[in-house]
Image: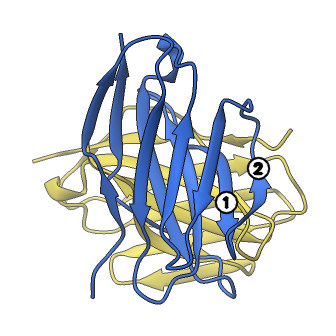
Amino acid sequence: QKEVEQNSGPLSVPEGAIASLNCTYSDRGSQSFFWYRQYSGKSPELIMSIYSNGDKEDGRFTAQLNKASQYVSLLIRDSQPSDSATYLCAVNEGGADGLTFGKGTHLIIQP
Amino acid sequence: DAGVTQSPTHLIKTRGQQVTLRCSPKSGHDTVSWYQQALGQGPQFIFQYYEEEERQRGNFPDRFSGHQFPNYSSELNVNALLLGDSALYLCASSWTRTDTQYFGPGTRLTVL
């Protein structure tokens, strides 16, 4: 059974610092990796996707992928209080397949 | 550009009843996936529809069924509701040649 593991938190980070969120997955056939942000009572919002080993940067966000270790991470630089949310890691085997999600990490940015 | 829309926003049903949830995909998208998100959990994949057929299904019982219409909109039907079916039901749309899924606002279902 495909599993995605995340530390549920809460992860508390001071404003302006770097927040580091981690995710491991069980299916070695996974090809596509996603980070979604979900505010309380809202639906998931796509932040980033990553497909190749290494880093991918988009503004204050950097996704990192290591397929050999089956590990994905998300770094948020210059954290802002508006970044406080639950961050969901999701994977699939590529194409338009259904996503397998972790339970999410609750991030709190302290002003 | 209209995003993914879902209706209704909230719904309250009693055990044993049946419910239908609706989803309209983002413009240009042809694939619709449905997810169930219980409180404090990540979304769980129910099934996916493409070309009006169920293409892939997660680990959900046959009480959960769906449909896709020629305009790519979709319905999720749940029969014989259980208390455990109470959750946020999310619809996500994508284009079949890509894997990026965009979520609608969700329907909050409460089963009493």
Mark 1: secondary structure = strand
Using residue A40 as the reference point, say whether residue B39 is left or right of it: right
Residue B57's mark? 2
Q: Residue at position x 69%, y 76% from top?
A: B51
Using residue A31 as the reference point, say whether residue B51 is left or right of it: left
State which tag comes first along the sequence, 2 or 1. 1
Q: In the displayed structure, would residue A6 be above or below residue B63?
A: below
Looking at the image, how many numbered discs can be counted on the residues? 2
Q: Amino acid at mark 2?
A: Arg
Q: How is the image coloured?
A: by chain
Chain in blue (letter): B
Q: Residue at position x 20%, y 61% from top?
A: A16
Mark-to-mark CA distance, 2 and 1: 6 Å
Q: Residue at position x 37%, y 32% from top?
A: A10
Q: What chain does mark 1 sit on?
A: B
Q: Amino acid at mark 1?
A: Gln
Residue B48's mark? 1
Q: Are marks 2 and 1 in contact (CB under 8 Å)?
A: yes
Q: Position of residue B35 (x, y in %)?
A: 55, 47
Q: Position of residue B106 (x, y in %)?
A: 35, 49
Using residue A49 as the reference point, say whether residue A46 is left or right of it: left
Q: Quadrant of the C terminus of chain B?
A: top left
Residue A22's mark? none
Q: Position of residue A96 (x, y in %)?
A: 70, 73
Chain A shade in the render? yellow
Mark 2: secondary structure = strand
**In the picture, residue B2 is in which quadrant?**
bottom left
Binning the other alpha carbons within 10 Å of mark 1 as few (below 14), some (14 to 19) or many (20 upward) gives many
Q: What chain does mark 2 sit on?
A: B
* Residue B101 seen: no
